[in-house]
Image (tube, coloured by chain):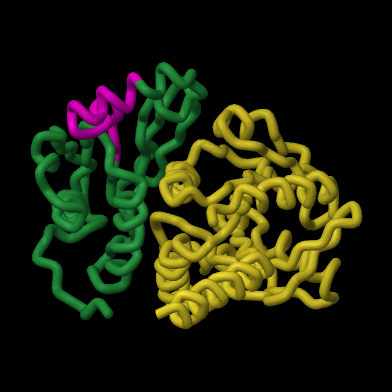
Chain colours: A green, B yellow
Amino acid sequence: MVKKRKSNKKDLGKIKGFSIQFLPYSEIKNLDSHQRIRKILNIVLGNYILILQGRLTSDEESRLIGDTMAMIGHIKNFKGIELAVISSNGKKSSMIDKMKNNIVNKLSGGDLGAITIIGPATIVKEIKRNPKKIELLLNK
Amino acid sequence: MAIKIFKNFFKRIINNIFKGKKDVKLGFYGPPNSGKTSLANRICKDFTGEEIGSVSKVPHETRSVQFKEKVEIEYKGKKMVFKMIDTPGIATKIDFEEFLKFKVNKNEAKKRAKEATQGIIESIQWLDDMDVVVIVLDSSKNPYNQVNITIIGNLVARKIPVLIVANKIDLKRANIKKVEAAFPEYEVVGISAKKGKNLEEFYESIFKLSKKIKK
């Protein structure tokens, strides 16, 4: 059970522009899942749109969604996040390509060819994707 | 010692017999308002005469996991018993103000939002317990949604067989090709749960997929 807590972050939803923070994968590489998610949510709660080099594991992504849900209603004005991962992995690829990717990912410690975009829902209304482009629609 | 070995051997045989007859846990996952409950209702109604839950145009109508035990599906002379598990739609954001657009009063909207967040957490927790999962997507909407990819990624990591259903093919804006293009590595079946369209193909895929359940 998450207890109600006062946020000492900037008030969400009261911005005139938006800020982007880039997080290289090296900064989360050696963190465990819990620490990674906490670091990401701290940035998002600071009203930043986070551009993360690489991507979380699917288990971490679902934990991120779960933790986000647990925070809604407990942090003032927090309505959740918008999340998108740009990666080549969704495409149908041959076994050899998959093996190559797996080896490269193992050596580098993660899928560094991917980019993850996470923003607070109060700022990012929607991240529209199709195979060729990605659009960030912002709230007025 | 010999009695103990014989006892264990006998126990294993009995367990295997009953394990083989265990109901297949069939989960319905997907974003809110994609028609998960409509599809689960259609199946339950056809084979048990009862529905599993209520449906509504208001998003997050299903806010807790719903079950229907012992649903025996018969298809082309074959029978399988399923435990149907209908889950709340997974989203990354919940805004109570969204519910106000559907003429829900403010207090009710806040209550709904709170229950919806808890429902999403519950849905995610249930991922571990599924045998087969049907991802229900609205074929009239953009399938390139990170939540869909995250759910599928989780299921693949757990080696749980996945079927993607492109629902609402009766709508003019429906585009199954787009869903297929978004998930080229998975079987996509286009259906209309509301109108009962193409359910034969859906049942065939479910029977095929159930054979892939990890032991």
- Lateral position of residue A3 relative to residue B113, left or right: left
- Residue A87 is situated, as x and y percent measured from the top left of the image, at 37, 28
Q: Quadrant of the N terminus of chain B?
A: bottom left
View extreme (front): residue = B2
At x 35%, y 65%, the residue is A69
- Residue B209 is situated, as x and y percent measured from the top left of the image, at 66, 48
- Residue B35 is situated, as x and y percent measured from the top left of the image, at 67, 57
At x 74%, y 41%, the residue is B190
* Placement of B136 over or under B17, stated as above or below: above
- Residue B72 is situated, as x and y percent measured from the top left of the image, at 79, 68
- Lateral position of residue A17 relative to residue B126, left or right: left
A122 and B130: which is toward the camera: B130
- Lateral position of residue B182 relative to residue B150, left or right: right
Q: Work out whether residue A15 can be spotted.
A: yes
Q: Work out whether residue B63 can be spotted.
A: no
* Placement of B60 over or under A50, stated as above or below: below
